[in-house]
Image (tube, rainbow, N blue to C red):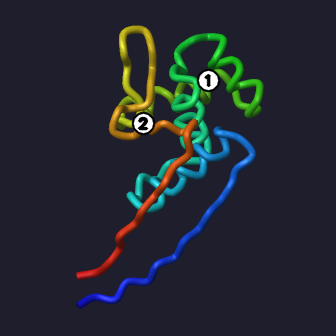
Amino acid sequence: MTNFVAIKIRKKFKDEFELAVKFYSILDVLNNFKLSPLEIRILAYTAIKGNIARGDQRNDFIDVYKSTYKSVRKTVTKLVKQGYLTKDNRRIVVSPQLLFNIKDGILLQLNMGHE
């Protein structure tokens, strides 16, 4: 029988964006996605807002996170090509397999082992 170590961590974040950034950062590390901080912020923002293609939402992201239109556009294109974001008609949204209801909080259970 294998003995497991159980660690319970309860963490509150100041807002849903901070929670989403932390969640996508954890996914990044555990799955070796090798996402940049800008890519993680774009995923988190898109998961909360629902669409990064709309001009007002993209411009809001640029203003709030001190980015440029060119870098956001280039990064969004890269995330679409890699499958992290997907095009849905005229919308660019988080791929369904990476989209979670961040608003209600997240319960994350990790079962880690070795061969």
Residue 112 found in image quarter: bottom left
In the rendered image, residue 51, in percent from the top left (x then y), is placed at: 52, 20
Residue 83 location, x and y as percent? 34, 35
Give coordinates of residue 103: x percent, y percent: 57, 36
* Mark 2 surroundings: few (<14), some (14-19) or many (≥20) residues within 10 A: some
Residue 43 % position (x, y): 52, 36
Residue plotted at (36% across, 16% down): 88
Q: Which mark is residue 99?
A: 2
Circle 1 sits in a helix, a strand or a loop, which is it? helix
Which residue sits at x=33%, y=39%?
A: 97
Identity of the residue drawn at 66% across and 12% down: 56
| Picture quarter with the N terminus | bottom left
77 to 39, vertically: above or below: above
- The numbered disc on residue 70 is 1
Residue type at mark 1 is Lys
Q: Is residue 37 above or below residue 70?
A: below
Proximity of marks 2 and 1: CB atoms separated by less than 8 Å: no
When asked about the image quadrant of residue 109, the answer is bottom left
